[in-house]
Amino acid sequence: MQFAQRLNPFLRRIPVWPIYALAFVPPVWLLWQAANGSLGVDPVKALEHRMGELALQLIVAVLAITPLRRYAGLSLLRFRRALGVVSFAYVVLHFLCWLVLDMGLLIQQAAGDVLKRPYITLGAVALLLMVPLALTSNDWSVRRLGAARWSRLHRLTYPAAILAALHYLWLVKAWPVEPIAYLGAILALLALRKLPRAPAARAAAQLSTTGPR
Amino acid sequence: MRRSPRTDLRWSDVTPRASFLSRRQMMAATAGAVLSAMPRTGQAGIATVPSDYSTGEAPNSLADVTGYNNFYEFGTGKDDPAAYAGSLTTDPWAVEIGGLVERPGSYDLADILSGVTLEERIYRFRCVEAWSMVVPWVGFPLSGLLDRVGVGAGARYVAFETLYRPSEMPGQNHAILDWPYREGLRLDEAMNPLTILATGLYGEEMPNQNGAPIRLVVPWKYGFKSIKSIVKITLTDTQPPCTWNQTNPREYGFYSNVNPAVDHPRWSQASERRIGAGLFAGRQETLLFNGYAEEVAELYAGQDLAQDF
């Protein structure tokens, strides 16, 4: 907690916009590597999987922000919207890699797969769930919807995250470690929200909402 | 202390593999017209004869063939085999041939290969994951070996087993599959002239990551049927257990013939991506029996291929 208290003033001074600027780096870097042949023997799968994995990593990061505040006192809330928007952008790029590069724009087979293949269906649903979240990730929408309705809407993040992890797990043959680790991390971060808060943390939270008297 | 003689040679002076390979390709192309009719020495030394069963399609590059492998004994990543298979000891190597055979025993690899004419077989290779390659194998028909050991009365199937050696095959330390890897064929499939035991590719000895020193290649079936690094061949009268079939019988049938009309429960098998074709190459149609219907369709006459998948 003390460490966090010393860190928080620094975090307050870091601007948010570099997240959006830095977000361009991984996709551009991956495309560059794919173009010059350093993404390995199958650049299509490499691009597609890396974009999906990056999106999943950002989703885990977004879900970690509330538990980090509650249990470590670290306030990263300012960065959450940017991380969420970037994760959505990566999900869209992951989808485009699949549709254009992997499926070669065979729209009929692609549409059939979305309906028939459970892992693709899950991925598609997760993407659709994220659309309203991305569209309302701005101050105007928060004002328009009101904070309560806006937060209720944004709880769609939880099913979207679980579906994304299942989408990964269902795709692979056998039981490799990575997809299980992502699903485990997401479920753990969601479970932390359900735990009763420790008395000290509750007091601290109350203090921070009501302010010093 | 003895010091090694100083030289001015550096690693940068060594001809890069890609360069000497392309030089060899040039030389081979020049010599090709002259040599095509007689046994030829491959790019680095294994003498092979060409085969009528070879496809005219352009083979994938050596980098593709040796850098993108499913060989879970070395890890589940496509580049794990290339990274970790170097530690595999492939000499000495013996194959135990038993079951319903007339001359069972442990056969040294040299004995298996003695007197055998190695052929270059350029085959299409279709993975169950819906990608494909073209591979210039070096090998010989499995039927030749089975004839030499004598197929016993009542034998109906051939079972194969991969080496189990966790000290050199790190993937075997994880229970990803029920090790050792096992595969099997019906006897008539095993005796089909397309079915080969391969000991090399691209005119060289088999790279470890491709299943050194000896592996099966059954080009009309999904790649996982072509079991690698074989140490045991058993002729049986009942259908032998196969690793992927046991792991998930709904997804991986005993036959596992390439068939665009029979989908994998989780993905379509109607089309495939040819590895090495480029970022925007898209997909190509998958052919029944991977394009080898003329040679093998009659094996399955009267069978419902959706049932016996």
Image (cartoon, coloured by chain):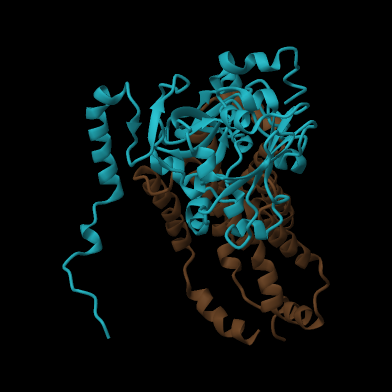
Q: Nearer the viewer, residue B60 or B214?
A: B214
Single out the residue that lies furthest toward the front. B103
Viewport quadrant of the N terminus of chain A:
bottom right
Residue at the image point whose x is 57% and y is 79% from the top? A8
Is residue A158 at least partly visible in the picture? yes
Viewport quadrant of the C terminus of chain A:
bottom right
Q: Is residue B109 above or below residue B41?
A: below
Residue B218, image quadrant: top right
For this view, does A185 lie left or right of residue A87?
right
Residue B260, image quadrant: top right
Q: Nearer the viewer, residue A112 or A20?
A: A112
Q: Nearer the viewer, residue B235 or A102?
A: B235
The picture places residue B100, in percent across and down from the top left corner, at: 74, 34
The picture places residue B235, in percent across and down from the top left corner, at: 72, 34
Single out the residue that lies furthest toward the right. A196
Q: Nearer the viewer, residue B295 or B187?
A: B187
Q: Is residue A160 above or below residue B191?
A: below
Instruction: Tell me, by letter, which chain the rendering colours cyan.
Output: B
Q: Colour of chain A?
A: brown
Q: Is residue B57 above or below residue B103?
A: above
The picture places residue A130, in percent across and down from the top left corner, at: 64, 46
Q: Is residue B48 above or below residue B105?
A: above
Residue at the image point whose x is 68% and y is 67% from the top? A66
The picture places residue B285, in percent across and down from the top left corner, at: 54, 22
Is residue A110 at least partly visible in the picture? no
For this view, does A104 lie left or right of residue B166?
left
Residue at the image point whose x is 81% and y is 65% from the top? A194
